[in-house]
Image (tube, helix red, strand yellow):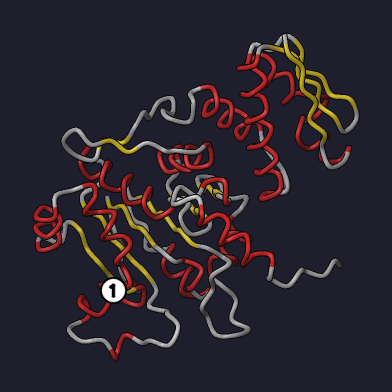
């Protein structure tokens, strides 16, 4: 039997993390079959096999990440994290992997990604915030393709605000579809990995897969559609409100974004930041936060992002 001690930041964190009268702690101990899992002030004492200790450390790391992002955790959060960790982060109970055609399968590669996939399966609206390379857009497309193949939705709608540094749509050649294509390139790359390029082309010609500038969503109601808004941090508050209210019967909306890469004019509030604040307590809406531990690109990307993060101005304490 091995032993491990986790030291928390404070007793207040311990209370929020372990639940009222340690109810979350007892649930974790039961789910992992721990011989001993105790709290002592701002410390958690873990005793068990090496595998049990490793799982417990992953559970508490994920719950602490959720606590920092949300300010609180719920019994459902604990249940979700336990299921993800005990299933190895590869298959999510009740969902499994996502079939995207033929023998191809997509599986989450981190605990955070697994929570994201579960949220997309269970909620009508999922908002995912994370850094570049954390898989937020790629997994959204994979889930939409899976729904389309299963017949759960009839079409996929890809939306992105046309906000980029130094470039405007009017300067690009071609019609509106041709103009918006460069902005949706990351989503097309994901589609072409999961479907044959000819099938993607055919679906676009038949409007089963549709690309749409954000401004052109006004006035529409989309039924039985998987609607993905990429780069949501570059929407204004009014644009985000307009987009989220396009949801019709049987539709699913996924919003992705990175709040460290906002390209809006100065003093313009990001619609993504505003939506997370307004909708964080609304039922049937999931808000998922990924971090640098979920980056699945070249490991050097994590170091690059960390270097740039170190140069950002520190927030003043109130």
Name of the residue lying farthest toward the bottom:
171
Where's the C terminus, which quadrant? bottom right
Q: Position of residue 27 (x, y in %)?
A: 68, 20
Measuring 29% from the left and 66% from the top, which residue is drawn there?
A: 185
> Measuring 70% from the left and 44% from the top, which residue is drawn there?
67
Q: Position of residue 47 (x, y in %)?
A: 75, 14
Mark 1, other Cα within 10 Å: few <14 / some 14–19 / many ≥20: few
Q: Residue furthest front?
A: 300
Image-quadrant location for residue 198: bottom left
Q: Quadrant of residue 13?
A: top right
Q: Position of residue 81 (x, y in %)?
A: 58, 31
Note whether 89 is above or below 64 in the view shown. above
Residue 12: x and y, percent?
86, 40
Q: Is residue 118 shown left or right of residue 171?
A: right
- Image quadrant containing the N terminus: top right
Q: Count the marks: how many?
A: 1
The residue shown at (55%, 54%) is: 302
Task: Tell me the residue that label 1 is attached to.
Answer: 182
Query: What residue is drawn where x is 70% and y is 40%?
Result: 64
Q: Decide if residue 307 is on the left or right side of residue 225.
A: right
- The answer to whether residue 231 is above or below residue 255 is below
207 or 28: which is nearer to us? 28
Label 1: element kind: helix
């Amino acid at each position: 039997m091995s032993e491990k001690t986790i030291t928390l930041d404070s007793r207040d964190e311990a209370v929020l993390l372990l639940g009222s009268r340690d109810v979350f702690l007892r649930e974790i101990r039961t789910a992992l079959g721990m011989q001993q899992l105790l709290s002592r002030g701002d410390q958690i004492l873990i005793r068990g096999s090496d595998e049990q200790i490793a799982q417990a450390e992953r559970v508490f790391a994920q719950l602490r990440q959720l606590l920092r992002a949300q300010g609180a955790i719920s019994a459902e959060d604990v249940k979700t994290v336990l299921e993800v960790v005990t299933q190895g982060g590869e298959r999510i109970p009740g969902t499994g992997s996502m079939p995207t055609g033929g023998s191809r399968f997509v599986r989450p590669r981190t605990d955070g990604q697994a929570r994201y996939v579960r949220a997309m399966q269970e909620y009508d609206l999922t908002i995912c915030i994370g850094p570049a390379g954390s898989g937020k857009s790629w997994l959204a497309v994979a889930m939409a393709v899976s729904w389309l193949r299963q017949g759960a939705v009839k079409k996929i709608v890809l939306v992105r605000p046309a906000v980029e540094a130094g470039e405007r749509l009017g300067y690009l050649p071609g019609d509106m579809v041709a103009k918006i294509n460069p902005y949706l390139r990351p989503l097309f790359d994901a589609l072409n990995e999961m479907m044959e390029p000819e099938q993607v082309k055919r679906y676009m010609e038949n409007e089963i897969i549709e690309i749409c500038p954000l401004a052109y969503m006004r006035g529409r109601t989309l039924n039985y559609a998987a609607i993905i808004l990429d780069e949501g941090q570059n929407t204004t508050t009014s644009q985000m409100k307009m987009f989220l209210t396009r949801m019709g019967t049987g539709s699913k909306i996924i919003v992705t974004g990175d709040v460290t890469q906002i390209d809006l004019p100065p003093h313009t509030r990001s619609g993504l930041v505003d939506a997370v604040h307004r909708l964080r307590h609304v039922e049937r809406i999931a808000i998922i936060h990924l971090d640098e531990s979920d980056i699945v690109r070249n490991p050097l990307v994590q170091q690059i992002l960390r270097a740039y993060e170190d140069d950002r101005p520190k927030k003043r304490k109130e």
